[in-house]
Amino acid sequence: MQIEVFPAASGDCLLLTSSDDRRLLADAGLPDAYDEFIATSLSELRAAQKEIDVVYVSHIDRDHIGGVLRMLDDEMKWRAFDHMQLKGKKFKQPAMPRPPAIRALWHNAFLDDISKSEACNWVAHLRPVPTRWLASMPPGWVRRKW
């Protein structure tokens, strides 16, 4: 497992890549942070013909979902460009890097799940991760992008 931590202003952005080359992008920070620190790295995935299997949005605060919305907007601009090219029409190529393909988009529906499962003992499921587990991770499991 590899974890890339991107600078995301006041939000978060993590790209997890599993040993079998699957990827989960957790949040994408603020839109400007996405543009400055995240978009180019993600576009390298597309150039390598790799996808993001899941984009996970933890919650809808702008510093978590803003970059995801920017990424989706960028992809729509690229798709419009592709469409116009197929039609043989002149259309300006988008200036921003093209994001990788996304197979699924998940959002946090934690409160919805709680209301449906009142009998569950949530305290037992929300224990903190033991620090000995973090200490046992192999060197290089976190790669920072700044």
Image (cartoon, grey):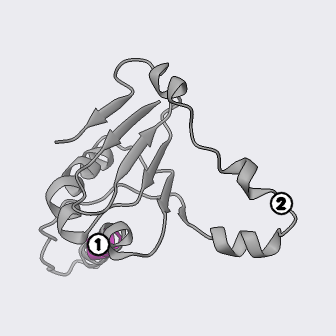
Say the numbered circle drawn on residue 70: 1
In depth, the one of 25 and 50 nearer the eye is 25
Position of residue 100 measured from the top left corner of the image (x, y, whole percent)? 35, 55
Residue located 27% across and 71% down the image: 74
Q: Which residues are magenta?
A: 71-79
Q: Quadrant of residue 82?
A: bottom left
Query: Image check: 51 left or right of 86?
Result: right
Image quadrant in which the C terminus is located: top left
Indicate whether 94 appears above or below 104.
Answer: below
Label 1, label 2: how far apart the Cα atoms are: 37 Å
Query: Which residue sits furthest right?
Result: 119
Residue located 29% across and 33% down the image: 143
Residue located 29% across and 78% down the image: 80
Question: Can you identify the residue that label 2 sits on?
Answer: 120
- Disc 2 residue type? Cys
Query: Image check: 2 left or right of 96?
Result: right
